[in-house]
Image (tube, helix red, strand yellow):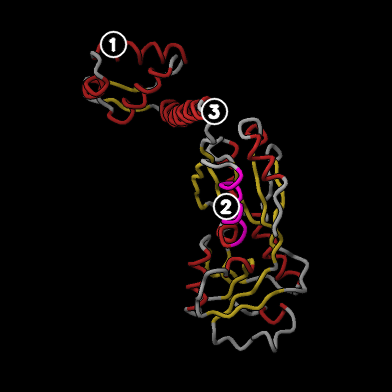
Amino acid sequence: MNIQQLKNVVVLSEKLNFTRTAEELNIVQPALSRQIKQLEEEIGAVLFKRDKRNVQLTPAGYYFIKESKKLLIQLERISKQTLHIHNGEAGEIRIGFTHSIMQTILPEILKTINHKIPGIKAVLKEMNNRDQYVALQQNELDIGFATNPMVPFNLKSKVLHIDNFVVLLPDYHPVNENNYKDFSVFAKEEFIFPTVSDGPNYVHILESICVDAGFTPKIIHETDSASTSFRLIEAGLGISIEPISSLHGHEFPIRSIELKSIKQKAKLTMLWNPEKESEYPELFNLLKTWKVD
């Protein structure tokens, strides 16, 4: 098995036609057929079902193609990064982040990186906690920034900043900072929460705020977008709990009350795969010692 075989089998999986695939690859069809047959024999599994009219992926083929695409992307990245290192260049880092991270510490972190490591390119992607775990473990991300993550055992983490939570209310809500006493006042309210599957630990923390106040939240809407949550609150479709940093830069006509007296805090956390430390030693040395001003 070699890289060209993987590339060829991926093209075939997209076209599902030996003749058109051979034409695109600029090889003869019998040679392509032999390559696929040799690959299947080497693996010990049939990747394609074919007859005189049709070519289809088998279940094993679907899995093989999915993983091969990941591998080819990783190989391309390795080649590029190796060239950057050879040329003495900083290279590229892929960063995942949640909404509240971008509203607070991430811009300053990026400014620091650009100042200390000139020429480094950052590819940014807003992602929920769960997707960051998966992407970091599969080497699709170099660094993640998440809020109250449940850190997998094979990843490292560092809390960079701690925020208070705020409760967000429609602008006309009868509760305000002046008459607010404790969170139990919201026992009969309808809540807007993130989805559990995308951040179970984070959602558990939000639920615990309600439980500590003596009630279980009635959740009527779920969204992983802070902006969507703000719009729903503005429309009077529920109330929500967010890190106070999520409000930075937004001017929605909604009311917020900072929850200073509760034990739960929003922990803005950096995550990374320790295998990446040797690839970017200067970057990780910088981030491990980074502090909020």
Q: Nearer the viewer, residue 193 or 95?
A: 95
- Looking at the image, is mark 3 or mark 2 earlier in the sequence? 3
The disc labelled 3 sits on which kind of residue? Ile
- Looking at the image, is mark 3 or mark 1 earlier in the sequence? 1
Displayed quadrant of residue 49: top left
Q: Mark 1 points at which residue?
A: 31
Q: Quadrant of the N terminus?
A: top left
Q: Distance between the residues labelled 3 and 2?
A: 22 Å
Q: What stretch is highlighted in magenta?
A: 104-116
The disc labelled 1 sits on which kind of residue? Ala
| Coordinates of residue 69 in the picture (x, y in percent) | 43, 30
| Coordinates of residue 57 in the picture (x, y in percent) | 36, 27
Which of the numbered marks, if any, corresponds to residue 111?
A: 2
| Coordinates of residue 158 in the picture (x, y in percent) | 71, 48
Q: Name the residue under label 3.
A: 85
| Coordinates of residue 180 in the picture (x, y in percent) | 70, 85
